[in-house]
Structures are given as structure tokens and as C-alpha cells.
Image (cartoon, grey):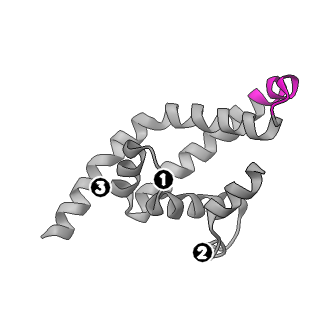
């Protein structure tokens, strides 16, 4: 009974995720520009359009993989709490492997948090 309720609730979240896509694209684009420019304002300006173009398929992939993974409820809960948790990490890994053409399990043993911390240095 609980499993059925979870599936039904996850199905109801799909339209919510679709509505969140423009905000997700904006955040991805801003993160891309900030990270890739390293704070250089001229470079940031030049990267705005390429980052917007990259954010479009990335946001679509994240939404699709959230639905496919069955982790919609977990991802939405984490988003609302303002944190990047286990459900989000699974979805990001699935999307990264998909966009990069890697085998789906190739990032299973990689900690995305460690990668992010390493790039921040």
C-alpha cells in the first residue's frame, strides 16, 4: 500500500518538476558561467550564451532522470530543504553519464561532493 502511494505521489510531482525547469535552467546557467569564468567578468559575459545553451539539455536530462529513477519525492524534498542529498546525487550521476555517453554505472563509486570541493580550491 505504501509503495503504491509513493508511486502515485511521484507521478503527481512530474508536473511540478516541469514547472521548475525554467528556474533550474537559470541556476545551471549561472553556475556554469560563474564556475567557468573563475570570476573574470569579461569571460563571464562571453560564457553567458554557451552556458544557457548547455543548461537547456542539462535541465531536461535532470528532470527526466529524476522521473526515471523513481526519486522524484526525494529530489523535491531535498530541493525544498535547500540541500544536495543522496537522491539528488543519484540523479546527477545518471544525467552526467547519459550526457557524456558513459556506462550508467561508471560514476557509482564517485563522490560528487568530493569533486565539487576539489574544483572549489
Q: Quadrant of residue 111?
A: bottom right
Q: Which residue is mark 2?
A: 108
Whole-angstrom CA distance, mark 3 to mark 2, is: 23 Å
Badge nearest the viewer, 3 or 2:
2
- Labelled disc at residue 64: 1
Circle nearer the N terminus (3, 2): 3
Q: Point out the residue furthest to the left here.
A: 1
Q: Residues within 10 Å of mark 1 (few under 14, many from 20)?
A: some
Give the structural element (helix, strand or loop) at label 2. loop
Q: Quadrant of residue 33?
A: top right
Give 42 or 4, whichever is nearer the viewer: 42
Which residue does the image show at 82% across and 37% down from the upper left?
Answer: 38
Residue 8 got which mark?
none
Residue 71: where, in percent of width, then height?
Answer: 39, 61
Q: Residue at x 17, y 61 (%)?
A: 5
| Mark 1 element type | helix
Amino acid at each position: 500500500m505504501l509503495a503504491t502511494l509513493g508511486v502515485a505521489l511521484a507521478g503527481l510531482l512530474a508536473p511540478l518538476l516541469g514547472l521548475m525547469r525554467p528556474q533550474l535552467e537559470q541556476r545551471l546557467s549561472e553556475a556554469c558561467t560563474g564556475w567557468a569564468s573563475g570570476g573574470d567578468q569579461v569571460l563571464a559575459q562571453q560564457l553567458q550564451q554557451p552556458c544557457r545553451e548547455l543548461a537547456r539539455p542539462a535541465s531536461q536530462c535532470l528532470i527526466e532522470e529524476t522521473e526515471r529513477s523513481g526519486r522524484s519525492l526525494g529530489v523535491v524534498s531535498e530541493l525544498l530543504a535547500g540541500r544536495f542529498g543522496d537522491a539528488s546525487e543519484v540523479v546527477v550521476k545518471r544525467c552526467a553519464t547519459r550526457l557524456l555517453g558513459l556506462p550508467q554505472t561508471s560514476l557509482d563509486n564517485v563522490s560528487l561532493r568530493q569533486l565539487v570541493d576539489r574544483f572549489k580550491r
